[in-house]
Image: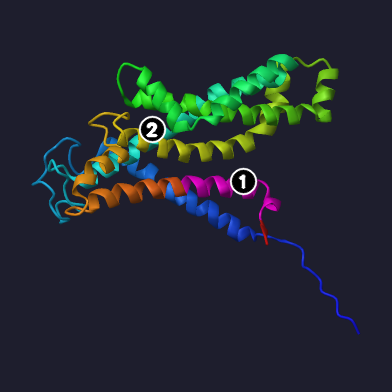
Amino acid sequence: MSETTTIAPAQRKPAKSRSAIFAIGLILVGLHVAIALTTVFWTPYGAMETAGMRLEAPSAAHWLGTDRLGRDFLTLVMIGSRIALIVGIGAVGIGAAIGVVLGLLAAFATKFLDDVLAAMLDILIAFPVLLLAMLVVAASSEASLWTATLALGIAMSAIVARLTRILVKRVLQNDFVTAARTSGSAWPSIVLRHILPNIWPTLIVNFALQFGIAIIAEASLSYLGLGAPLPNASWGRLLQEAQGTVYTAPLGAIAPGIALVSLVIGANLLADGMRELRDPTRSTQR
């Protein structure tokens, strides 16, 4: 008697697991948002205040010790959350505004213009986001928080534009768009009532991913001295300043590193959770 082996079909990831991913991401990002909002009204010490001796160990007065200038390190790390969120949200907003408009124009353009725009977007995407941002910052007169945010937004807009173009072209093939055109609806009305509502969920997930990329890129710019200047205590700047004292005061490198990683992981988990909650069939157990 022969035995047959059956392969069980792929199982969907349980709803609780998907919700847990989203919840963990929301908690991590929400924690940084709460810290950032707190720094608007209160910090343990001033950002540029010499609160103690140089490189003090953690104590009741300074929970994370002091840096090489005697500034309270907990204060600097807290302010770093605010800087990261400002740059991350600002860069995503600028990239979304530019990218969505370019993507819509490419999708509705003639075949020749569409091909030209698509080729230009592919060329821009071939360059790393950090490299494009460095070029934009270098072209400006001086490095600032606004310059870093604008540079990252412009660098990320190509990715958003390409995704928008693909999504819009896909939606345009649907019957409800054809019906709207046949009924005499103008293109602005079709875009607002039919196209944007259908592509927005996918774009939101991409924006969450771009948020994490922007935070890493901003920290990299600040580490290279191209980010926000003092008194903006960027995590990248803190890491750069701590590299010379990493053996004598390791918290100077560990604390901003953990803060940076936790926010990026939170953004990625949030994006992954939104994607899975939107389309549970994407997640399967192999």
At 13% from the left and 49% from the top, the residue drawn is 55
x and y, in percent, of residue 39 in the image: 28, 39
Classify 18 as above or below 67: below
In the image, what residue occupies the spot 38% across and 34% down?
218
Q: Which residues are magenta?
A: 266-283
Does residue 74 appear left or right of residue 102 in this picture? Answer: left
**Residue 86 got which mark?**
2
Give the amino acid at mark 1. Answer: Arg
Which residue carries the number 1 mark?
Answer: 275
Question: Which residue reaches farthest right?
Answer: 1
Q: Which residue is pictured at 20% across the width and 36% down the height?
A: 47
Query: To which quarter of the image does residue 135 belong?
Result: top left
Is 40 rendered above or below residue 261?
above
* Residue 195 included in the magenta stretch of the image: no
> If the image is split into quadrants, where does the C terminus sit?
bottom right
Q: Amino acid at mark 2?
A: Ile
